[in-house]
Amino acid sequence: MVELLVVMAILGALTALLAPALQAARESARRLGCVNHQRQLGLAIQNYLGAVGVFPPGAALPPEGGDGAPALYRWSALALVTPYLEQPVLFDRLDLSQPLYNASFQVSVVNREFVRLAPEIFLCPSDHGQRVAEAFGPANYAVCTGSGVGGPGTGDDGYPLETDGMFGVGSSVGDRQVLDGLSHTALLSESTLGPAAGAVPEGSPQSDYRFVGAPPLSPAKCAAGGQWNFTDGRGFSWANGEYRCGLYDHHALPNGDEYDCVAAVFSGAWRFLPVGWRAARSRHPGGVNVLMADGSVQFYDDGVAAAAWLALATRAANDP
């Protein structure tokens, strides 16, 4: 009996030693899968660049002669590069000439089936991977708008217009406009999903965000925001080119402690335009993967210097 107890104790100690190693190995495999997805998306973006001559916009505007409010088109860069992915059969009937939303904020009938698809390439294996909104397929990946400064507002307003990064609403950036160098400019990173559809919000910056009504944004306004928008959680749609889904910026460091912050324009020509600050976030320990404009993927630590992180976000600030 004593010998059996000793053997059991040894086995228990070995299990306790092996469990963290096994978990680390599994996370390493998941992170490698995440990097592979980003590289595939980078290749699709480069193929789009080769075919069209510019990088895709972060959110599409109406085609020439198209009807509807500009901010309702919203098709994300991920949606726009679907013809260049290795699985075009999934999207061969996706009609990008139609706005994503109609005036009643309903997806057109022709696209409803396809925006609900949830291809693995849009998801990081380290996250939960479940639907965040029943009508859409989720996404962990978002393209970079820059430093979080720009647009027709004043100061650090979070407008996705006239951004200083690679992407924005209606952006049309060519590789020759990336004066800081393709290898020094962020193209895409990851951001964590919100709670699965029907789940209770966990109340953390990694899962939730603040909704503060109308812009402009300011750090004080976002910190004091009393409204929380859980109608559609973080990353709820790969098809949607807005700050809750297809866009992110470097206003805050990766996996920062402050909540991401979104607002919406309620009047004027840009009615319904989402405005926001959204950080790169991941479930990987210690940092996030970033796809650079040259196609490489780099891992950046949560403690990266703020100046270096901002420099990565801009395309032509003379700060490689």
Image (tube, rainbow, N blue to C red):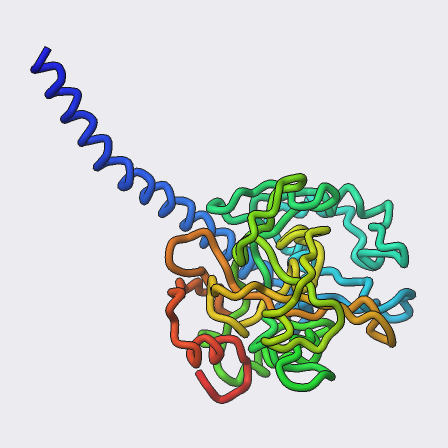
Depth check: give the residue in front, 115 or 272.
272
The quarter of the displayed image where residue 240 is located: bottom right
Q: For the point 72% across and 41% down, which residue is it?
A: 134
Relative to 183, 221 lies left or right: right
Q: For the point 78% across and 46% down, which residue is it?
A: 93
Depth check: give the residue in front, 145 or 33.
145
Residue 161 appears in the picture as rendered:
yes
What residue occupies the far bottom of the structure in this picture?
318
Q: Position of residue 311 (x, y in %)?
A: 47, 80
Image quarter of the C terminus? bottom left
Question: Against 154, is 42 above or below?
Answer: above
Question: Against 288, is 164 above or below?
Answer: below
The quarter of the displayed image where residue 20 is located: top left
Question: Against 310, is 132 above or below?
Answer: above
Q: Position of residue 283 (x, y in %)?
A: 46, 51
Q: For the point 82% across and 73% down, which residue is it?
A: 270
